Amino acid sequence: MRKILKSLVIWSSLMLLFNACYNDNEYDLYPFSGAQCDSTNVSYSKTIVPITSANCNSCHSTSNPSGNVITDTWAGLSKVANNGKLWGGVNWEPGYVTMPNLGVKLSACDLGKIKNWINQGAPNN
Ligand code: HEC
């Protein structure tokens, strides 16, 4: 019984620690750093492509799409943009696999840009 309790305590502390580290992203630490961030003026080619090239395409290319998700074409990305999986993944919503997988959460600025593009209907512009 004591053993079980002890391992429970250790596990919960580890979970807390793990979560604490993972929540150390720009958005939580500096919620107002968005001041210099222009997330209003977004287009697929100028705003979204640089984000996916830097953070997603290594695992989600057309030739090797993890989880059958393609992020290096508009067709592939707009599909997950419109079915909720893109936002769920990058914003680490409950029930979605966190993206970038095993990586660091995107900055609040990048998240704002993605959100705005999704809200506009994920246009190919
Ligand atoms: C290190 C590799 C890796 C990177 C980088 C990565 N992904 Fe993923 N992604 C995966 C894997 C593996 C899966 C499948 C996970 C599963 O089904 O368990 C996945 C699944 C997804 C899904 C489907 C999630 C779901 O719940 O169905 C979406 C959407 C996604 N990724 C988007 C992205 C975006 C956007 C980026 C960049 C911000 C990104 N991924 C970066 C590996 C990666």
Image (tube, rainbow, N blue to C red):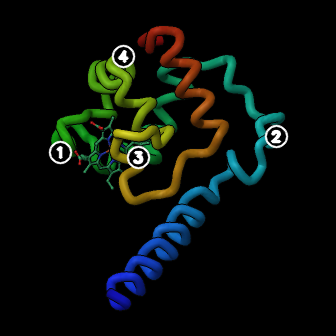
Mark 1 CB near ligand 1 (8 Å cut):
no
Contact flag, marks 1 and 2 (Cβ < 8 Å): no
Of the numbered discs 2 and 3, the one sitting upstream in the chain is 2
Q: Relative to 9, does residue 92 appear above or below in the rendering?
A: above
Of the numbered discs 1 and 3, the one sitting upstream in the chain is 1
Of the numbered discs 1 and 2, the one sitting upstream in the chain is 2
Image quarter where the N terminus lies is: bottom left
Task: Give the numbered dot on residue 99.
Answer: 3
Instruction: Name the front one of labels 1 and 2.
Output: 2
Q: Give the residue at mark 4.
A: 82
> Which residue reaches farthest bottom?
3
Question: In what quadrant does ligand 1 lie?
Answer: top left
Relative horizontal placement of residue 116, taking residue 30 as reference (left or right): left
Q: Could you say where residue 41 lies in the image, as x and y percent from the top left?
A: 67, 17
Cα separation, mark 2 vs mark 4, equals 28 Å
Contact flag, marks 3 and 4 (Cβ < 8 Å): no
Relative horizontal placement of residue 20, taking residue 45 as reference (left or right): right
